[in-house]
Amino acid sequence: MRLYAALTALIATAIGVGVLFFANSALSPLLLGGPGSTCPEPDCALGAGLWLIAGAVAVVLVAFLAGLLRPAEQPVRRGLWIALWCTAVYLVESVVVWVLI
């Protein structure tokens, strides 16, 4: 049963993080060149992209490990709950990365 929760968390988090990553990629020209931009250079997009990729990998791995931690009566529900929180953490990370860059 732990494996069901872990796989559900892994797949759902990967989908959520993938959607957010591609949204960040689409918005990066606006986020970099907007008013008050501290670094409108392409290097900033590369730095933000590397942080977002590393964060995406870390969040997906954490979701999988969290799904394996303890057995659940409803493993799919637990996996989706883990995925929700991990995707929210990635969203916060992406906002922090864009504010700092």
Image (cartoon, grey):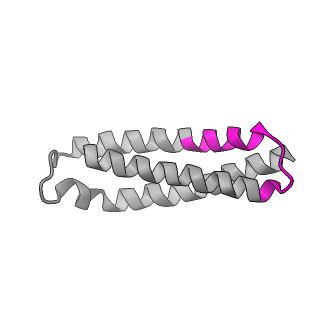
- In the image, is residue 46 above or below residue 34? above
Image: magenta residue range: 59-76
Q: Residue 61's spot in the image, x, y percent?
A: 62, 39
Q: Is residue 17 left or right of residue 1?
A: left
Question: What is the quadrant of residue 52 in the picture?
Answer: top left
Q: Is residue 39 left or right of residue 79?
A: left
Magenta stretch holds residue 16: no
Q: Residue 25's spot in the image, x, y percent?
A: 37, 56
Magenta stretch holds residue 62: yes
Question: What is the quadrant of residue 15 in the picture?
Answer: bottom right
Majority secondary structure of magenta residues: helix
Q: Is residue 101 left or right of residue 10?
A: left
- In the image, is residue 14 above or below residue 60? below
- In the image, is residue 46 above or below residue 83? above
Determine the residue positioned at 72% across, 53% down: 79
Q: Nearer the viewer, residue 27 or 59?
A: 59
Q: Is residue 26 left or right of residue 81?
A: left
Q: Residue 9's spot in the image, x, y percent?
A: 69, 51
Q: Quadrant of the C terminus?
A: top left
Q: Residue 35's spot in the image, x, y percent?
A: 13, 59
Determine the residue positioned at 39% across, 50% down: 94
Most extreme residue toward the left is 36
Determine the residue positioned at 33% across, 43% down: 48
Q: Nearer the viewer, residue 93 or 56?
A: 93
Determine the residue positioned at 47% across, 38% down: 54
Q: Looking at the image, how many numbered discs can be counted on the residues?
A: 0
Q: Nearer the viewer, residue 34 or 41?
A: 34
